[in-house]
Amino acid sequence: MLDLILDKMIGTVAGSKDEIFKIGEHSRQQYESLVEELKDIKMQVSIVIEEGDKLEAQARLARNRLSQVSKNFREFSEDEIREAYEKAHGLQVEHTMLQQHEKQLRDRRDDLERRLLGLQEIIERSEALVGQISVVLNYLNSDLRQVGMLLEDAQQKQDFGLRIIEAQEEERKRVSREIHDGPAQMLASVMMRSELIERIFRERGTEEGFKEIKSLKVNVRNALYEVRRIIYDLRPMALDDLGLIPTLRKYMDTIEEYNGKTKILFQSIGKIEEKRLPPRFEVALFRLAQEAVTNALKHAEAGEISVKVEVTCQSITMVIKDNGKGFNIKEAKGNKDKKSFGLIGMKERIDLLGGKMTINSKIDLGTFIMFQVPFNGN
């Protein structure tokens, strides 16, 4: 029995080594790809700056021309006056758009540089971990007499898994705040500018231009909404500030509004609005609910999804139910598609918390998922 346990441990550690090596190689490929993209972005920035200087010079000449026409407008025809105004205005608009494009490129450049630093750290840490795991493998294979001592440390495997998840959540939190402080703020600024341009066009009676600006507002507003939705997918900041229940309620409202066709009902049982759970419980339960609801929206074609959460002194129970087309559980477990990977990911999360996942689903009868996690809330 000890030999069998040892063989399983060696297989697990060897598999972990391979996975970490793959992570390192994947990160290295991403790093090289981002380096090339960064070079291209820097080149684009230089080109845009050069074009901006040329446009600024042309705009200055156009403004001077417009000033002369304005001072001596009696000496010029109506077409010449209109041409001078339109040319000056067009160059100014083009120069403003080029400045915005330059800012976007600079933001992208800064983001790439930050990501490169993060990837470099991952590569270095993965190389160090591979070396450390190799030492552990040699130790396991060479000294069987210490198997008993190694078995006593089996709990470390679970702790290691939890640390990986926590590290992932910290990374998502960082990326979320970066997007919030960058693209979201930029789009908000564009919205304010579009309102200013709209007022100018309205006062001068340019009807077609006004329609175009209104269309621009709709597109920008949609882009801003999409950025904020991405922030929620990465890491809702409300989870740190408000806790699990308020964040889940807000998330379900946002998803319902975004999808439109599917009604999402959320219910918390008991007075748990202000109750804060340990961070790893809040993060894991939010991700479980997010994964289950996302699967229902993508695969079940459900008209209604209900989410219920109950926290007691002994346990946490969460139920996600939909009236979609359902699926064959046995076939899903045997297939290596996105749906099966989603089920596997949820099972791994619940296992790390020492909980249990129950799934019931039948074709055309919807899906029922229940998560139960032991919790000492005293």
Image: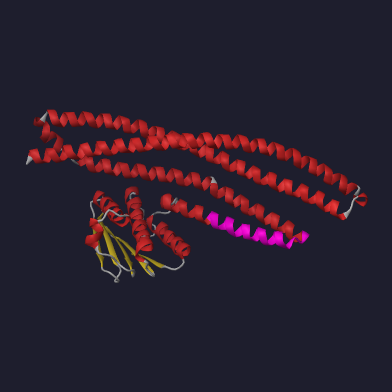
Give the residues in magenta.
204-224
User: Which residue is at a point 17% across and 37% down the rendered structure image?
Assistant: 10
Q: Residue at x 26, y 40 (%)?
A: 160
The answer to which of 343 and 256 lies nearer the viewer is: 343
Position of residue 145 relative to residue 90, above or below, is: above
- Residue 64 location in percent, x, y? 83, 42
Render colour scheme: secondary structure
Chief secondary structure of the magenta portion: helix
Magenta run includes residue 341: no
The image position of residue 33, as x and y in percent, is 44, 37
Tally of marks: 0
Q: Nearer the viewer, residue 171 or 41?
A: 41
Residue 271 visible to the viewer: no
Kindly indicate the quadrant of the structure image that contains residue 174.
Answer: top left
Q: Is residue 182 left or right of residue 84?
A: left
Q: Position of residue 193 (x, y in %)?
A: 66, 52
Left or right relative to 180: residue 209 = right
* Residue closest to the eye, 331 or 264: 331
Q: Residue at position x 69%, y 46% from top? A: 94
Q: If the image is split into quadrants, where does the C terminus sit? A: bottom left
- Up-down relation of residue 327 to residue 174 (above or below): below
Residue occupying the far left of the picture:
1
Q: Which of 241 and 260 is in front in this view?
A: 260
Quadrant of image for the N terminus = top left
Q: Is residue 91 visible?
A: yes
> What is the x, y in percent for residue 361?
26, 66
Any magenta on residue 216? yes
